[in-house]
Image (tube, helix red, strand yellow):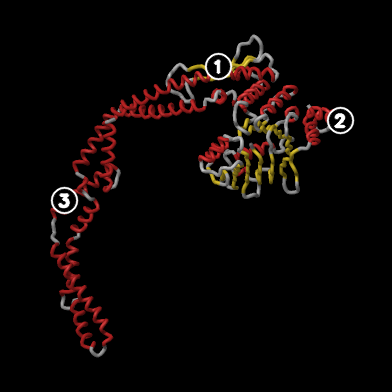
Amino acid sequence: MLLNLSILDLAIVKALQLDLTQGMSVLTGETGAGKSILLTALGLALGERATADYVRPNCKRAEVNLEFDLTSTPSALAWLQDNDFDEQQQCLIRRIVNSDGRSKAYINNRPVTLQTLQTFTRQLVEIHGQHAHLTLLESDEQRRLLDNYGKNAELLERVNTCFRNWQTTQHELQQLQKKRHDAEQREALLRYQLDELVTLNLVQFDFDALSESHRKLANLDQILSTGQSELDALYEADKSVHRQLKSCLKGLTQIEQFAPELNGVNTLLNEAQIQIEEAAYELRHFLERQEANPAQLQEIEQQISVLQALSRKHHVKPDELLALQERLEHELAQLSHSGERIAELEKLTADYQQVYVPLAAELSAQRQKSAKKLQQHISRMMKELGMPNGEFLVEVTALASDTPKLNGNDSVTFLISANVGLPPKPLAKVASGGELSRISLAIQVTTASDKTTPTMIFDEVDSGIGGGIAEIVGQKLRQLSGNRQVLCVTHLPQVAAQAHQHLFVEKQHHADMTASQVRLLTDEERIIETARMLGGVELTANTLAHAREMLGR
């Protein structure tokens, strides 16, 4: 269960520490006091999306901490063990929202993604919002409630896994069948393009090497002329570098006997002379091998021209033509084998459908069975909630087609008959606002009592209810807290009086800021708050006596 809620710099809450206990706790206060901020904080800590608006003005970040006792939640402890978190009876969840809107989440001081956080906290807390009666009108929500009540989660997941496999295969099949219509035309084009590329035998062509050979042949005259000129300068001319170096070396060798320190200079000049001789030899050998070849130059130019023309035609670079050929070959192979793939996919879709049909039938039978129990329980509770002639029905209708669908092949509809002699009609068509609130509450309490979630939060789910019915609602919520923790935000004194713990939310105004605070009421303070909820601003002796009597009961 939830032991502690800690909030720092979240909206109008500067700092708040809230200790919670087992049983039923109510949260009351004037409208606008900040009750919704507490639920916002809980939602953030449980993994809801965050925005920069949540951060208190002029603060760098907002922080929410939740401390849980997992003693009675073995599934959560097992989850922590399976995911390599610290296995402790106490679990700390932290959510930080920065002023730029970015946020971080932690479980036992280890950073986690929002998806991981949501997966874990779903086992710990369940929130029933004040607008639950509106979503109750949606067909998918009605189906979800029935499946939750009937514990169909595992079977539903098997059905949906099979559906998703069928859907993926069916989508690929439809795409291939659609392409098949113009496949012949595309195949002819591919064959023409491939023939053009294959005939050229691109493997033997290296565009960069061809370009380099072309540059060399096209500039051969300049290469020979410049090369011979530089060879003369290095070695063969009367005043070549080699001869001048040789003369220099001769002169220095003569004076080396008088200046031994010139030995190093002579050594360097000797090495230079050798290097020049080798360079001259290599250059001469290179020039002797060069021969003008107009025919080869013309052939290379033609090859380059063909490659460039093809590259322009296919909108690729010349050196990418071989990769293009491979892609076209792959696509042609796919087209050529599309018939085989279509046959394979047709068999796969039929196989998935064959698996899906009995699974969907099993799910439908489970829903039919659960529907009878659920409608009995809710009809009984409707009567307790002031609808003596109310009858609640759950209609599970099998869809005509066996084509796989998400969540099975059933349509789930909640029906109600509020008065004797009137046939049941869909919930959205017959229920008034007050009736819808009571029916919604009946469904939430009924489906919640069969769950193992240790902490349940009800946010003004009792709106539209008053009088003796409100007292019954309070009793039902208190009964629900017999084996779990229930936190209820309410404006009804009849509900608040049933709580084991009464928390009061109030705004405190200071010179430079306004902040919400929550405090646990003493027995005497509970009487005053209950009287306020009963009688308004002015508390009379009768109102206080009435409040004392309610709490006494």
The quarter holding residue 343 reads top left
Question: How much space separates mark 2 and mark 1, taking CA atoms?
Answer: 52 Å
Residue 110 point in image, percent of width and height: 55, 46
The quadrant where residue 506 appears: top right
Could you tell me which quadrant the N terminus lies in?
top right
**Mark found first going from the N terminus, 3 or 2:** 3
Q: Is residue 199 above or below residue 215?
A: above
Residue 284 vs 179, above or below: the answer is below
Q: Residue furthest top?
A: 421
Residue under the point 49% across and 19% down = 364
The label on residue 299 is 3
Residue denoted by label 1: 395
- Say which of marks 3 and 1 sits in front: 1
Could you tell me the amino acid type at mark 2? Ala
Looking at the rendered structure, the secondary structure element under dot 2 is helix
Residue nearer the viewer, 372 or 47: 372
The 10 Å Cα crowd at callout 3, few under 14, some 14 to 19, many 20 or more, is few
The tag on residue 541 is 2
In the rendered image, residue 113, in percent from the top left (x then y), is placed at 52, 42
The x and y percentages for residue 387 are 68, 17
Q: CA distance from mark 3 to mark 2?
A: 115 Å
Foreground tag (3 vs 2)? 2
For numbered disc 1, what is the local secondary structure?
strand
Q: Earlier in the sequence, mark 2 or mark 1?
A: 1
**Kind of residue sitting beneath label 1:** Glu
